[in-house]
Amino acid sequence: MLMLIERLGPIEANRATDTLTLPYERRVLGRLKATSDAGLSLGLFLDRGPVLRDGEGLRAESGEVVRVKAAVEPVVTARIAAGLPLARLAYHLGNRHVQLALGEDLQGSYVRFPPDHVLEALAERLGASLERHEAPFDPESGAYQAQEGDARSNAHAHAPGHSHDDHHHDHAPPHAH
């Protein structure tokens, strides 16, 4: 078993000897057994907390480097006009304490999240068009968890002790985290 013990941050694909494709729910774990895309048995022994990001390199005790890939999984992509409508959509979805991926492609800006009928109904009420499909899910890292050089930010960061439990509610009045 190849023991992966060090995070290298984002790396070029040619620096890795193998890849490890994982869905988001497994990329939040610091300790796990997995099989690389080439069939090699892996053990992850990493610091807990930071999510493994798509494109991140992991170094083994023996020096090999494995590159993490975000798996294709069910997602909902919500599209709405840029500016205030997009900001409002991201705010209200983020206020539900869920992981969100923010992005832009040839069709414009979007907010992506795991399938959830409550979130989907909210997005539609706010005027978003929804696409239910499969794509890599690589949500924003929290502002308090952003690593040096990490250009990502989160639409809803959390203070210590404020969990990401699956609960849906509005905050009134709005508060900073």
Image (cartoon, helix red, strand yellow):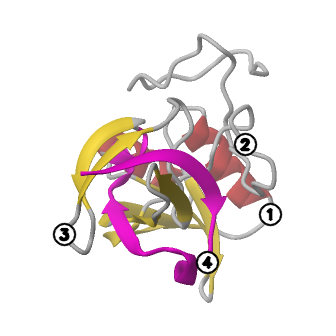
Instruction: Please identify the quadrant where the C terminus is shown.
Output: top right
Label 1: which residue? 83
Eyeballing the image, is 53 above or below 145? below
Q: Is residue 6 left or right of residue 168?
A: right
Question: In x, y percent, where is residue 85?
Answer: 71, 58
Nearer the observer: mark 4 or 1; the answer is 4
**Tag 1 or tag 4, which sits nearer the N-term?**
4
User: Looking at the picture, does residue 133 appear above or below residue 46?
Assistant: below
Residue type pointed to by label 2: Ala
Label 4 is placed on what type of residue? Glu
Return the residue at label 2: 146
The earlier-in-sequence mark between 2 and 4 is: 4
- The x and y percentages for residue 10 are 64, 64
Which residue is more in the foreground, 26 or 42? 42
> The residue under label 1 is which amino acid type?
Gly
* Label annotation for residue 39: 3
